[in-house]
Image (cartoon, grey):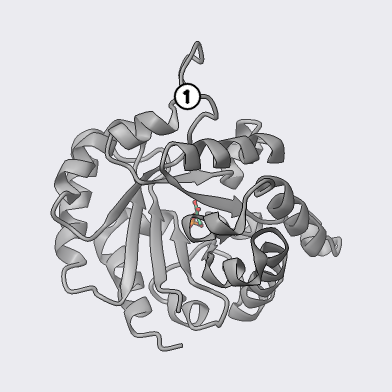
Amino acid sequence: MRRLLIAGNWKMHMLNHEAVSLARQLKLRLLGVHRVDTLIFPPFTALTSVAEILSDADIQLGAQNLHDQRSGAFTGEVSGEMVRSAGGTWVLVGHSERRQFFGDTDAWINRKVHAALEAGLRPLVCVGETLEERRGGRLEEVLRRQATLGLAGLTPALAAEISVAYEPVWAIGTGVVATPEQAQEAHACLRGMLAEVLGVDGAQHCAILYGGSVKADNARPLLGMPDIDGALVGGASLKADEFGAIVQAGEGVVK
Ligand code: PEP
């Protein structure tokens, strides 16, 4: 009932001409993909030009962050409405790099989620524990805090607009990928928490993506797990062939 979604987070990579070139390659590489949804998050500076390239492609587009205010004296920030006007329909919220380096708190993430929805954007909300938290037996506690505070105030009617990415911090950009069983356990746990916020039906409609060192050669078993509804891919999304192969792995999954 939930279609797989493979999303690429380009982070702070890709000059404008490089982004245009990668978007063109992706468009060709993903021709013929029908069973899996695809989505990319280029840097803000490339949104407009990538949107133009993708105007006749079945690849969705989003930004990597937004501010919670609609406009104002917030130098260096970008609003949801600005992302929309640049052609984005999605936005990443609460990526662990934002939490770690830019002070995104659960409360701020929650305001950003609401701002995204008000601007007509679909938020992909990232959660995940550090290695220390996992080793300390705090996985469930951390996920509960991030999910309940980050998604506070949402109603079941909004469930279809929201997606979550489980990204264990120890797996992001490290080459260490969670095992399918570890990821499934966290996803099932998150699905239960989502049911408390969005209702049981809402939680069933909410996609939960796995992120953390996903590559073409490890994607398939992860994507085959019952509560894993796709992948958020960082490094491997910067090469059209590698990203295409991950999408292809998703096409082969039957649930
Ligand atoms: C990410 O940036 O969200 C991510 C999962 O990165 P990587 O795939 O490089 O670990």
Q: Residue at x 55, y 29 (%)?
A: 68
Of residues 175 and 187, the one drawn nearer to the viewer in this rendering: 187
Amino acid marked by disc 1: Arg
Of residues 21 and 189, the one drawn nearer to the viewer in this rendering: 189
Q: Position of residue 175 (x, y in %)?
A: 53, 62
Q: Secondary structure at mark 1?
A: loop
Q: Residue at x 36, y 79 (%)?
A: 249
Q: Position of residue 119 (x, y in %)?
A: 43, 36
Question: From the viewer's perspective, is 27 left or right of 127?
Answer: left
User: Does 73 appear above or below 177?
Assistant: above
User: Does 105 appear above or below 21?
Assistant: above
Question: From the viewer's perspective, is 97 left or right of 217?
Answer: right
User: Does 151 appear above or below 232?
Assistant: above
Quadrant assignment, res 202: bottom right
* Pointer 1 residue: 70
Q: Residue at x 69, y 47 (%)?
A: 152
Question: From the viewer's perspective, is 231 left or right of 197?
Answer: left
Dot 1, crowdedness within 10 Å: few (<14), some or many (≥20)?
A: some
Q: Residue at x 38, y 72 (%)?
A: 216
Q: Is mark 1 within 8 Å of ligand 1?
A: no
Specify the quadrant that holds the N terminus. Answer: bottom left
Tell how many labels. 1
Spot the residue most to the top.
73
Q: Position of residue 77 (x, y in %)?
A: 47, 23
Q: Position of residue 74 (x, y in %)?
A: 51, 15
Spot the residue most to the bottom.
254
Spot the residue most to the front.
157
